[in-house]
Amino acid sequence: PLLDYEVSLTKDANFRLWSDLVPSLDIETHKAASPDVIIPTVDTIRHVEVLGAYLRERKPLILCGPPGSGKTMTLTSTLREIPGCILQELNFSSATTPELILKTFDHHCEYKKNPKGTILRPTEVGKWLVVFCDEINLPEADEYGTQSVITFMRQMIEHGGYWNPLQQEWIKLERIQFVGACNPPTDPGRVALSHRFLRFAPLLYVDFPSVTALHQIYGTFNRALMKLFPDYRQYADPLTHSMVEFYKTSQKRFTPEQHAHYIYSPRELTRWIRAMHKVLSTWANRNDVQLEEIIRLYAHEALRLFQDRLVEVEEQEWTGKKLDEITMKHFPNIDYEIALGRPIFFYDWVTKDYRAVDRTTLRDQVQSKLRVFYEEELDVPLVLFNEVLDHILRIDRVFKQPQGHALLIGVSGGGKTVLSRFVAWMNGLSIFTIKVNNRYSPEDFDEDLRTVMRRSGCLGEPICFIFDESNVLESSFLERMNTLLSGGEVPGLFEEDEYASLMHQIRENVSKKGLIMDSENELYRWFVNQVRENLHVVFTMNPASPDFHNRAASS
């Protein structure tokens, strides 16, 4: 088809296959878990070429596609190729208002008055601020069918500025560009964008990578991973084919129509690779490792990623059987009992290595830790049975992942908070919760967020932030949490004196660590990365709550 060809206008005006432009890539093992590594495929090269043309012309645009199709990754990789850009990512939700955009301007821009009026432009000289609005079609429409934040953006794009009612003046924008991303409007909780807005912003569709592209991407990662075990390098391709086949089979079997959280995307494969890399790179005596041990780890991570979200027992059993079937198809000569025998537990509280352990050893170890925990932290002893043991290991695995956050769903009194506190205590994480009362306001919530971000970002303190749905007194609370989870920051949270105080605290800690950073932008990015590394959020929800399905779809 014509889509497979590029027209070369600069040289000979001939048609060239995009596939001829795809370089073969070989990466080192330590880069297999890096979020910055992008494996080029026909799709990524084509998208980057089209996106780059729009971005270099400073035109607004919107990327539309299913969750996990690589919209954000494509945009950030394209912006890296364009010098002089500052990317600010905003995560929209059903409650987003124009205030979020204005707070972003306050953080990154400055107001300059001249004889012709007031101009708003980025503080960094000569640079463009690219405001990336993710989930741009989530904000709810009012009774007149208007999304206020979208209408506000349309005004700024169409007229190059906006009216400030407080100062009674027109604010003109300079070097500010808007880019959006969204799921198709047919998905739950989505609101179709108005045609008046879309006439200014072209829409580009980004679909899931093809099976060939998935083999190319994750084959590269698995070959890097198997460099740790030279004797098993030839198993990188079977590992890739089994992972992709299991992912595609699960994606076809479980759909969002069954449950809102049954969303399977290539993100699952990326998490699978990163989790395996994190464990395999810490194993000692790699020359003595058997292939069955690697396959057992592969199966453990598959069950955590694909099985733990399933609601029905029958669905969980189907997933376990399908994993066995696909694994034995690609690795017919392995010992089934050693590699896939149930139950599969991985744990590093018994040994220094994160290795497979049996249930009896695990139970004894956890029981002794629990005894100390309830003596120090709780007055009520906990009863340890198989389901509790499973949940403890699942939460423990999340806390060990970079940017590991968990959504725990279960009836009230089921132990979601207690188990989170226990696992956090085991991993040396401090517990942070908010104390809600009748007079608790959004300002109080902002102050709590500033506290937890200072502790995790400036002081480098590992923190488990347990946030229950009963704490969500206003929709703005979820708005801020969405933004914090997606980017490690909340625009406009630190302003004026608070921002100056934060910068002073960051400088002190950076100098203590012997790091050299000159600009405020560098210091703030270091702070954001520290928050993302040290803060683990556990959001607990009750499926019986009337807001459960709405929040699952729209936040």
Image (cartoon, rainbow, N blue to C red):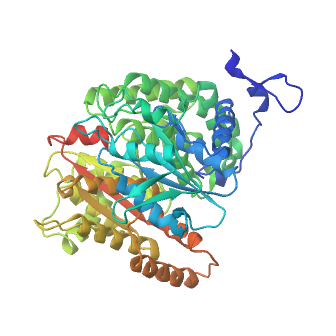
Q: Position of residue 118 (x, y in %)?
A: 50, 64
How many numbered markers are drawn? 0
Q: Relative to the observer, which residue lies in front, 324 or 529?
A: 529
Along the horizontal axis of the image, is 478 left or right of 126? Answer: left
Q: Is residue 387 above or below residue 325?
A: below
Q: Tell me, yes or no, if residue 362 can be seen here.
A: no
Q: Quadrant of residue 185?
A: top left
Q: Position of residue 261 (x, y in %)?
A: 33, 36
Q: Is residue 142 above or below residue 436?
A: above
Q: Tell me, yes or no, if residue 136 can be seen here.
A: yes
* Quadrant of image for the N terminus: top right
Q: Relative to the observer, which residue lies in front, 262 or 480?
A: 480
Residue located at (29% from left, 71% from top):
447
Of all residues, the one furthest to the front in this rendering is 115
Along the horizontal axis of the image, is 143 left or right of 507? Answer: left
Q: Position of residue 183 (x, y in %)?
A: 43, 34
Along the horizontal axis of the image, is 530 left or right of 222? Answer: left
* Quadrant of image for the C terminus: top left
Of all residues, the one furthest to the left in this rendering is 438
Q: Is residue 242 above or below residue 166?
A: above
Residue located at (27% from left, 63% from top):
422
Q: Position of residue 374 (x, y in %)?
A: 20, 68
Q: Quadrant of residue 260?
A: top left
Q: Relative to the observer, which residue lies in front, 154 or 500?
A: 154
Q: Is residue 337 above or below residue 526?
A: above
Along the horizontal axis of the image, is 374 left or right of 5? Answer: left
Of all residues, the one furthest to the right in this rendering is 12
